[in-house]
Image (cartoon, coloured by chain):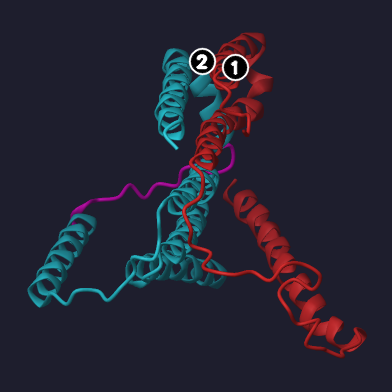
Amino acid sequence: MTGQYLAFFIFALMAITGGVFMINLSRVIHMVLSIGLSFFGVAGLFIMLQAEFLAFVQVLIYAGAITIMMAMGTMMTQGGDEGEKPKRRLHNVLSFLSAVLVGAFLLYGIYTTSWPTEPTDLGANNIKEIGVTLFSNFVIPFELASILLLVALVGAIVLAKRDGEKD
Amino acid sequence: MDYIYSNSYTVITIFLLLGIILPLATVWGVGLILRPKNPAPEKLTTYESGLEPTGDAMVQFNVRYYIFALLFVVFDVETVFLYPWAVAFDELGLFSLIEMSIFIFMLVVGLVYAWKKKVLRWE
């Protein structure tokens, strides 16, 4: 299927260019936007892997909430500290070497794993299946998630409120 | 069953492409032919009838904006749970409604706490 290859190419390009720009750009807000592009590319890849729910969560949480959080966090900072990057040659060589090593390790893992190739039917109804499993077998973890969210909300308010009253 | 998935995403791709192409074609395609064009220096200012912006946009904003972002993230995570619940509701029945009510009640407690702490008020 050429359409799938084309879509994979576009999404992979989005993910990779987003990551590369995120590291190389100097202004923080541009970094946030490029990591957003990368998140959208990963969401497209999830859709191509028939993981609709993951793609939805990727767009909603990562491209939506996390990017907004980072943009808001950038607004809190003072700004104006983007200067010349310090030139560190040894640092660059070491980071290149570690990147190559991690990549080689991942490739080795991918090539030595035997992937199950029998056709499965996970794509068509996967959100429904997730819903049925979550709300019948995993009710207690689901309710605990609400407690966790409540604690996070209250903790965030306590922290931010105390900071806000100083000024 | 696999073809259902790929067919539905083909339709979504067509809609996505239409959504990208139509505004571009309106602004730079048909619009170029239809709209009158006589730019004046007054028209080309950033705000035609407002104040001229001065200084850098990268200033430190009030921390209160951040609390709204935090609240948004919490209720965004809630939506992630609402979505499979809504899709599978036909098979789950009444008990899942009670489960989801407890879940939402917990988050409403957080919202009421934020309200009582006057986080939502702008002073």
Residue closest to the eye, B28 or A126: B28
Q: Residue at x 86, y 82 (%)?
A: B30
State the mark number for residue B58.
none
Say which colour chain A has: cyan
Q: Residue at x 69, y 68 (%)?
A: B17
**What is the quadrant of the C terminus of chain A in the image?**
top left
> Would you say residue A8 sits in the magenta stretch?
no
Question: The disc numbered 2 marks a residue on which chain?
Answer: A
Q: Is residue B68 left or right of residue A161?
A: right
- Image x and y of residue A57, in percent: 51, 42
Residue closest to the eye, B86 or A19: A19
Numbered disc in front, either 2 or 1: 1
State the mark number for residue B112.
1
Q: Secondary structure at mark 2?
A: helix
Q: Residue at x 66, y 13 (%)?
A: B93
Q: Residue furthest left?
A: A90
Q: Quadrant of residue A145?
A: top left
Q: Label 2 belongs to which residue?
A: A136
Residue closest to the eye, A64 or A40: A64
- Image x and y of residue B106, in percent: 54, 15
- Which of the chains is red? B
Query: Which residues are drawn in magenta?
Result: A112-125
Q: Main secondary structure of the magenta part?
A: loop
